[in-house]
Image: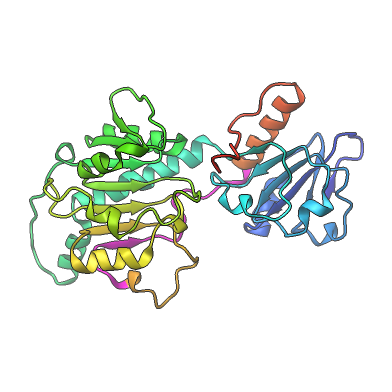
Amino acid sequence: MKTIAMSAKSPVLVDLKFSPATVAKALEAAFADRGSINLADPSSKGADLSHVDYALLWKPDADLFKRAPNLKVIFSGGAGVDSMMSIAGLPDIPMVRFVDRSLTTRMSEWVVMQCLMHLRDVQGHLRSQRQHAWAQQQGPEAADVTVGVMGLGVLGCDAAAKLKVMGFNVIGWSRNRKQIDGMQTFDAGELDAFLAQTDILVGLLPLTPETTGIYNASLFSRLRRDGALSKPVFINAGRGKSQVQADIVSAIRTGVLGGASLDVFDVEPLAKGDPLWDLENVIITPHDSAVSEEKALMRHVEEQITRFERGEPLQHLVDRSRGY
């Protein structure tokens, strides 16, 4: 447990289920004006948390809010907050999502990479390589392909902008229509029209009751069938519970989908016996498209606490009614 004796400021409570060594290293240079209580540190066992004002959390202990009843602000350790929203005893205080340039950039890199891999059939080239086969391909260029991004928050908008730089035609869908220069957008009532134009579907939605299981057989069947790609592709780096994995498997096997790239899953790690591992044209990554970088996370929390204590509004606040 690190504290600063001369400071009268409340230390920041940290309960992050990340690598303990990485978190401890990041905390060495963080919160120098107030110190921290790292619950992963054995020395913090049984620590009095009643005086703590701020908590930085990711999948916190179930009794945390009973132990820290006087919190003023909760900071999420990730861009998503769905795991937090279901915790019993969650206090009705401001909750702040993690938004960081580096995290956003890494997510966009992953999305662009996956779209290009399917556009240029990298999996097909790898199969030919393993067979020592010289098999040239002539696929469409990016401008012939429409990428539909579901979820137009910070991550979705940045990914869309970078996909456009690569030449893709990009459209966007969100529950409420967003006006974005140079991009056609759709709202909740226009999902069918959005899907009918989409060759590559990119999922970056937060997890809410409305988005749970939204990527399912019915949705896949409404994707564009007559586009530049012979079959549509599904890419998901949002939340695992937003997809029905059995429907993805079926859609790949029956040709409803021509491919998929998945970074998130209903249960993680993905079970070794899951059929997704062995399907052709399915790319699996272990939920590392945009991992929170601990030092950037600490800086984000420091900046927001400074704003809060100056009487300025917190940024990236969670809307409890929407769940994100």
Residue in view at x 39 percent, y 37 percent: 174
Which is more toward the observer, 302 or 70? 70
Q: Number of numbered discs present?
A: 0
Find residue 212 and report its image quarter.
bottom left
Image vertical order of residue 21 relative to residue 112, above or below: below
Tell me the quarter of the image containing the C terminus. top right
Question: Who's the residue at 85% across and 49% down the image?
Answer: 49
The image shows residue 308 at horizontal and vertical percentages of 72, 27
Residue 136: x and y, percent? 7, 57
Q: Position of residue 21 (x, y in %)?
A: 67, 58
Q: Which residues are magenta?
A: 278-295
Q: Is residue 35 magenta?
A: no
Q: Relative to residue 81, is residue 146 drawn left or right?
A: left
Q: Nearer the viewer, residue 80 or 142?
A: 80
Let me know if residue 287 is in the magenta part: yes
Residue 244 placement, left or right of 64 = left
Question: Is most of the magenta stretch helix, strand or loop?
Answer: loop
Q: Nearer the viewer, residue 189 or 160?
A: 189
**Can you name the residue that lies furthest to the front here?**
189
Residue at far bottom of view: 273
Figure quadrant of residue 7: top right
Q: Is residue 115 above or below residue 159?
A: below
Residue 221 position in % (x across, y down): 23, 55
